[in-house]
Amino acid sequence: MIYLLLFWEFFQIGLFAVGGGLVTVPFLFDLSEKYTWFTSQELTDMIAISQSTPGPVGINMATFAGFKAAGILGSLVATLSEVLPSMIVVYFIAEMLSKWRENKYVTQTLEAIRPAVLALILFAGWDIAKETITGYENTAVLFILLTAMRLYKTSAIFYIIISAIIGIALKI
Amino acid sequence: MTGLWKLYALFFKMGIFTFGGGYAMLPILKGEAVEKQKWITEEELLNYYSIGQCTPGIIAVNAASFIGYKLRGISGLIAATLGVISPSLTVIIMVAALLGQYMDNQYVQWAFGGIRISVIALIISTVIDMWKKNIKDVRGYIIFAVAAILLWYFNMSAVTIVIIAAACGFIPDLRSKKQ
């Protein structure tokens, strides 16, 4: 029964991939070796597409892999199974957090982690920049966008739409 | 009180404008959940990201689950999570069905060239915004600097960095004078 198998495999990925969407990649490569659902070459394409389609990349990859394995129902099963463990874990942590909100050690620990997470976030930006910011044109666009963002605090969504238009306009 | 349907719809909207990993979603969460809806504070949002670093699952989903749970308990958690994964389900199924045509379309490629630049700018801008409230004292600067060095020069994993930073929270001598 392929749906049960999909549930089991993706539930495990959701449980053991700690640290975000791209951490699931090695697990997906394991699947490509273990089953005939998709080849590793197909998986490479799926990862690339998942990064340039709407939606968090980890979810996109799970949906894609599930679709390749067993169509629309497969994509539903894979995605829901992958998010189930984190939903359960978040539920328990959120419960504990609200109970221990006043606890000195909890607030102290979270306060200490936040600066490190800012560094992690900046590093994620750097990772994208390494491949994207090549040449004067893109550098100029980056600075213009950044300046605009600092001056006009419009929503992130607005800038994403604008930049898609800029991307097309620059090439036409 | 925020309705479940509204929660679902707003997370659907945030999901559809997320291009890339959970970090690409941070500026959107900050704009929508913190500033516009005032569901959570900036600090809470970063807490969710901190916890998401060392718990199972996709960070964007973890953040959505946390926010949903805070607002409406378990049903909120489920509504927000379903909201954030729904765009992927619809878009990817469509793309998978028409595979090739989407990626080969040059307008799509060009648009993504632009979007990627704005994702970088948004990440930088969000870090600047969040800097003040989250890096308040010398200890904060040190943790940020050490984390940055470990990332850039030693390629250390996010989980390790978070654990090291957490341990720093227990060093009493470095606590700020405000305490």
Image (tube, grey):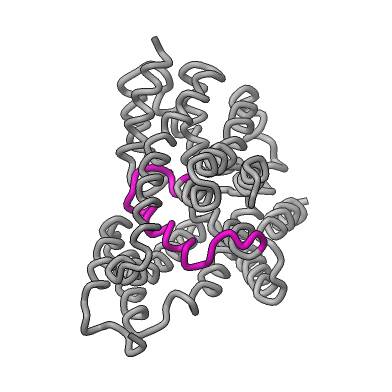
Query: Whole-percent x and y of residue A172?
Result: 78, 51
Q: Is residue B140 left or right of residue A83?
A: left
Query: Whole-percent x and y of residue B147?
Result: 32, 69
Is the residue A92 above or below the residue A63 in the image?
Answer: below
Residue B49 magenta-highlighted: yes
| Depth check, front residue: A44 or B147 | B147
Q: Residue at x 43, y 57 (%)?
A: B48
| Depth check, front residue: A45 or A55 | A55
The reply to whether residue A25 is in sight is: yes
Quadrant in which residue B89 is drawn: top right
Q: Residue at x 33, y 41 (%)?
A: A17
Residue A11 magenta-highlighted: no
The reply to whether residue A134 is in sight is: no
Query: Whole-percent x and y of residue B179?
Result: 33, 85
Query: Whole-percent x and y of residue B130?
Result: 51, 72
The region drawn magenta spans: B36-61
Is the residue B112 above or below the residue B140 in the image?
Answer: above
Is the residue A114 above or below the residue A20 in the image?
Answer: below
